[in-house]
Image (cartoon, coloured by chain):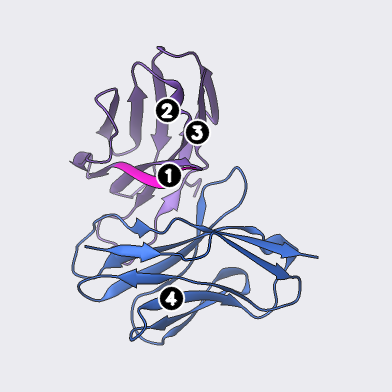
Chain colours: A purple, B blue
Amino acid sequence: DAGVIQSPRHEVTEMGQEVTLRCKPISGHNSLFWYRQTMMRGLELLIYFNNNVPIDDSGMPEDRFSAKMPNASFSTLKIQPSEPRDSAVYFCASSPASGVESPLHFGNGTRLTVT
Amino acid sequence: AQSVAQPEDQVNVAEGNPLTVKCTYSVSGNPYLFWYVQYPNRGLQFLLKYITGDNLVKGSYGFEAEFNKSQTSFHLKKPSALVSDSALYFCAVRDMNSGNTPLVFGKGTRLSVIA
């Protein structure tokens, strides 16, 4: 089990550029979550999917943020255009859909810096 | 609504001493409770969970937590702290009757174990 895989690990970009973060959940996991972590706000849930369908995107800060899950093994989080205040660590996590008792499995995150 | 409170931003303890990281929760039904640990530049890692049964739950790395329904608490404990336990600790809750909705995380408590 390779765990949840996120890429890239680090991303540095200039304000206004498009940023795409990628996530491969654990095989067989049907739920996928995107979180953002900052010193000021802690861990924030941005959006989550069940069976590739977005269930709740109320945590997405603005229309500049979008997320997709085209299949069970891949998801993207896109920021267009990026702004310095988007600088944070972005985590992807997955869990079995039926596993309300199951813990989330987190990737190691993507550290985004927008200059 | 579900919520979690971790009243301490920082806990300092000497190596070899017992440690406690506090967590209280609020749910309308019965809770599923989780503790996670985050080491630098890594994602959150699952430590232990309470689902039902024995109020004292044992987890990874010698950690344990005690579920106290009357006090709505789920404090994390370890009898003898190690320097390597220094990390960020998160408590999380899900209402048992809420289906596979996302976990609600606390803001985290930074544990520093001093040699």
Three-letter code for the amino acid on which mark 3 is drawn: Thr
> Magenta stretch: dominant SS?
strand
**Would you name the residue on which mark 2 appears?**
A86
Q: Is residue A42 magenta?
A: yes
Sooner in the amino-acid sequence: mark 2 or mark 1: 1
Left/right placement of residue B18 relative to residue A40 reads right
Image quadrant where residue A72 sits: top left
Q: Residues within 10 Å of mark 2 (few under 14, many from 20)?
A: some
- Image coords of residue B48 (percent x, y): 48, 70
Sooner in the amino-acid sequence: mark 3 or mark 2: 2
Residue at left offset 47%, top offset 66%: B7
Left/right placement of residue B56 relative to residue B104 reads right
Left/right placement of residue B68 relative to residue B113 reads left
Three-letter code for the amino acid on which mark 4 is drawn: Phe
Q: CA distance from mark 2 to mark 1?
A: 12 Å
Please provide the residue range marked out in magenta. A40-46
Marks 3, 2: nearer the viewer: 2
Q: Residues within 10 Å of mark 1 (few under 14, many from 20)?
A: few
Q: Are marks 2 and 4 on the same chain?
A: no
**Would you name the residue on which mark 3 appears?**
A110
Residue A26 seen in the current view: no
**Would you name the residue on which mark 1 appears?**
A41
Marks 3, 1: nearer the viewer: 1
Q: CA distance from mark 3 to mark 4?
A: 30 Å
